[in-house]
Amino acid sequence: MGLLLKSAGVGSTSPVGFSPFGCGVAPIVSRWRRRKGGRVPTSVLIVDDDPSFRAVAAELLRAQGFVVSGFALDAREAVEGVRRGSPDAVLLDVNLVDVDGLELAARLAGEGGQHRILLTSSDPRAATDELAQRCGAVGFLPKTALAPSDLRRYFEA
């Protein structure tokens, strides 16, 4: 059985990679659905150890037209979620409990995935765009700057 994560949008727990509704970390069905104009929504894995931030980030991403593919609380869940779920993008907290987000970004980017990683933190000085890009991410945004920003700039090529 796969890793259990809280499913995005359903409110139940499902094994990663085995979600029959396209929810959780492996959004098989949702990736095939088309929006107006024939565009497939970008799926985003949220990696943060703060449950209140995960909820706010999920709502923000959905409001901007993204599909939240799932949540990860630490580095192990993030790596597993990326491997099994193949999200298009990852919103990654710099200050995770178990690992530095910059190190995790480099690890995820080094695994050859096509996902775009955006680093974030409640500390606006935790990183810079330049440092984030050296770690394989597309950039850094403080958490307070996420809501007013057009995240398509970071998550859509």
Image (cartoon, rainbow, N blue to C red):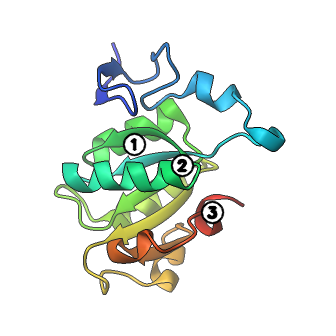
Query: What number is the disc on residue 38?
Result: none
Query: Which residue bears the numbered disc 1?
Result: 79
Along the polypeptide, which appears first: circle 1 or circle 2?
1
Quarter of the image with the C terminus in it: bottom right
Q: Residues within 10 Å of mark 1 (few under 14, many from 20)?
A: some
Is 150 above or below relative to 76? Answer: below
SS category of the residue bearing label 1: helix
Q: Residue at x 53, y 57 (%)?
A: 109
Query: Which residue bears the numbered disc 3?
Result: 152
Q: Residues within 10 Å of mark 2 (few under 14, many from 20)?
A: few
**Relative to 74, 150 lies left or right:** right
SS category of the residue bearing label 3: helix
Q: Residue at x 28, y 22 (%)?
A: 13
Query: Which residue bears the numbered disc 2?
Result: 111
Q: Nearer the viewer, residue 22 or 80?
A: 22
The reply to whether callout 2 and callout 3 are in contact (CB within 8 Å) is no
